[in-house]
């Protein structure tokens, strides 16, 4: 929200890239391994718990900055590759995504028809919809930044975001 549309696009592409890998891994049968191997699931789960906790603490302590540097008014640059990588790691460390795809995809695949074209259509549709919503959230959030900056609420947003990530970490750990 406070890094701009370009940064949101990089993060969105990172998350969607991870989602696509999880989708194809699910199709390839890795979801069956995760569903039956409690050790593999547990290892990936605790990696995700630790990373969500790290991100939550980082967000909680983030400074209350907006799109521009308060000293000189210039737009701060963000490394798109770093943002892509961060979103990719968050996405790829969620083992539940593979299990979701394993439960979701079979409902829309006709076993009597060639499966590859069906999977291409499903994954393409899922990607377009996911990117649309991620960029819609980013655009809406980007519009809120000036209002939040004027009202001094960015620190509150950082705390809410950090708290949500820490909560998600705790929820994942408890299951």
Image: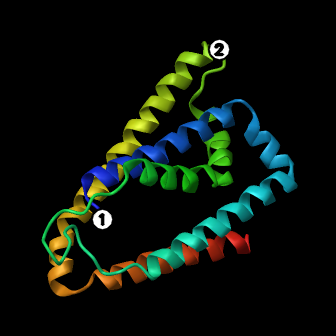
Vertical arrangement, residue 80 with respect to residue 113, above or below: below
Tag of residue 156:
none
Which residue is found at the position 33% from the left and 54% from the top?
A: 8
How packed mark 2 is, by other alpha carbons closer than 10 Å (few <14, some 14-19, many 20 or more), is: few
Count of marks overlaid on the render: 2
Relative placement, left or right, of 1 versus 59 is left
Q: Residue at x 35, y 80 (%)?
A: 63
The answer to which of 103 and 67 lies nearer the viewer is 67
Q: Nearer the viewer, residue 59 or 16?
A: 59
Quarter occupied by residue 75: bottom left
Q: Nearer the viewer, residue 79 or 108?
A: 79
SS class, disc 2? loop
The quadrant the N terminus occupies is: bottom left
Q: Secondary structure at mark 1?
A: loop
**Which one is earlier in the sequence, the residue at label 2 or at label 1?**
1
Where 138 falls versus 23 (above or below)?
below
Residue to which mark 1 is pinned: 1
From the image, state whether disc 2 or disc 1 is nearer to you: 1
Q: Pointers 2 and 1 in contact (CB under 8 A)?
A: no
Mark number, residue 112 = 2
Coordinates of residue 108 in the picture (x, y in percent) = 56, 31
Task: Residue 175: name its quadrant.
Answer: bottom right
Q: How is the image coloured?
A: rainbow
Q: Residues within 10 Å of mark 1 (few under 14, many from 20)?
A: some
């Amino acid at each position: 929200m406070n890094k701009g549309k370009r940064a949101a696009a990089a993060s969105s592409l990172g998350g969607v890239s991870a989602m696509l890998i999880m989708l194809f891994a699910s199709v390839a049968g890795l979801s069956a391994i995760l569903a039956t191997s409690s050790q593999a699931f547990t290892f990936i789960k605790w990696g995700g718990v630790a990373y969500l906790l790290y991100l939550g603490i980082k967000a909680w302590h983030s400074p209350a900055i907006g799109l521009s540097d308060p000293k000189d008014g210039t737009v701060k640059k963000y490394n798109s590759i770093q943002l892509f990588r961060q979103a990719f790691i968050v996405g790829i460390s969620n083992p539940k995504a593979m299990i979701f795809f394993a439960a979701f995809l079979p409902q829309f695949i006709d076993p009597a028809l060639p499966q590859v074209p069906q999977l291409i259509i499903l994954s393409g549709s899922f990607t377009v919809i996911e990117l649309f919503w991620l960029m819609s959230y980013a655009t809406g959030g980007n519009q809120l930044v000036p209002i939040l900056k004027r009202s001094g609420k960015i620190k509150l947003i950082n705390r809410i975001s950090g708290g949500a990530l820490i909560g998600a970490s705790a929820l994942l750990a408890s299951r």
